[in-house]
Amino acid sequence: MPELPEVETTRRGLAPHLEGATIIGVVIRNPRLRWPIPDNLPELLSGQTVISLKRRAKYLLLDCGSVHVRNATPDNEIHHARSPLPNPDGTTSHSTKLPKYGSQVAGYLPYTGEGANESLREFHVNGTLILHLGMSGSLRILAQATPPVPAGGMSGVSPQLRCDPPAIHDHFDLLLDNGKLMRLRDPRRFGAVLWHEGDVHAHPLLAHLGPEPLEDYLGSFDARYLYRATRGRNVAIKTLIMNNHIVVGVGNIYACEALFSAGISPLLRAGKLSLARCDKLVTAIRTTLSAAILAGGSTLRDFVNTSGNPGYFQQQHWVYARAGEPCRCCGAPIKQIKQGQRSSFYCGNCQKE
Ligand SMILES: [Zn+2]
């Protein structure tokens, strides 16, 4: 499963190919990911310029902006996808009617400058394409097979003509005006491609996330924060640091490795963690994730023009997946237990409760 370091490495690998490019087409081969890909995405994204590719937790956020000129008549209404998450009854809302031209909502600002008149107006549309790799997703940059793009976009051109032949699990392509395309491959289809207008951090998937472990961003993840977050908590410390509401992006591998590095047993009740050990654990989480991102830097070329899966990082682990093998510090056999449906690996000698 792609963890935060893989997602951040993906972001760094893709950003130079995407930022500043204009989207000229969208290919949806299979919309049935974790949530359906909005069916009006091609019309929403075509003509949008990619402003930046950012990351929040394990979500990649493709910030887009564009100016649309449309004929405004009294009956004009446009449909925009907004947060196409499943409703509680299992159905999905694909689109919501936005107010008629002239009214103002977030991400949808009528142009009132020079040239604006009663019948023709410009609309600045700002939105974010939210991408998640799920359990098995990967994103790659490929060359389009048949540039340049015909005027009016690629919508009439068959997918086989406009890009390298897609494989069975290649569900989604973003075609760019620089002759490249970004392709999502996701065999297990737990990934997501969603569209949100306005402040993306208010999106239901992002609004309740804890702070980033590596950046002081939307709250800072430090010893005092972790100390406060653990008071009165009876849950095991490993379970707590894997909770996205406490801190984002600490997956099973990195939780195991960081706890070993900090000398803390995964079984320790969170509420018993001292401030000094909180400091050790925060440092260990940051160091472990940073080292993985650094290691991933050498695989950046794998995001471009490869035909296969870029693969997730194969790293030397201290404890993860080493059950029964000798601890690299003391030689004692590494233990494996189950905590909240996940396997925990630790050294009973080096890691204390
Ligand atoms: Zn040991």
Image (cartoon, rainbow, N blue to C red):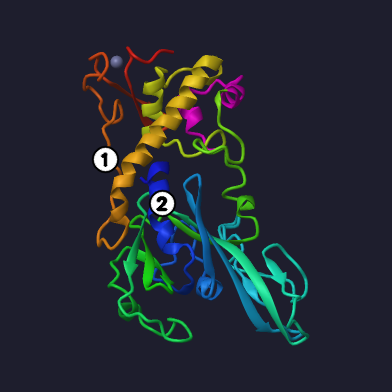
Query: Which residue is at 44% across, 60% downward?
Result: 33
Horizontal arrangement in the rendering, residue 128 relative to residue 115 (left or right): left
Residue 344 lies, with reference to residue 49, above or below; the image says above
User: Residue 39, how many percent across, how many down?
Assistant: 51, 71
- Of the two numbered discs 2 and 1 on the same chain, state the one appearing first in sequence: 2
**Amino acid at dot 1:** Gln
Relative to 287, is 99 above or below?
below
Would you say the residues marked 2 and 1 are in contact, meaning their CB atoms lie under 8 Å apart?
Answer: no
Question: Which residue is disc 2 drawn over?
Answer: 12
Q: Which residue is mark 1?
A: 314
Residue 314 drawn above or below residue 117: above
For the N terminus, the quadrant is: top left
Q: Where residue 306 appears, x then y in whole percent?
A: 26, 61
Visible residue check, residue 269: no
Nearest the viewer among 169 and 114 is 114
Residue 132: give x, y in percent of width and height: 45, 53
Please report the bounds of the magenta region as a residue range: 224-244
Disc 1 under 8 Å from ligand 1? The reply is: no
Residue 234's mark? Answer: none
- Secondary element at tag 1: loop
Q: What is the CA distance from the residue labelled 2 to the residue labelled 1? A: 18 Å
Q: Quadrant of the C terminus?
A: top left
- Count numbered badges in the picture: 2
Question: Residue 184 falls in which quadrant of the image?
Answer: bottom left
> Visible in this render: residue 266?
yes
Q: Quarter containing ligand 1?
A: top left
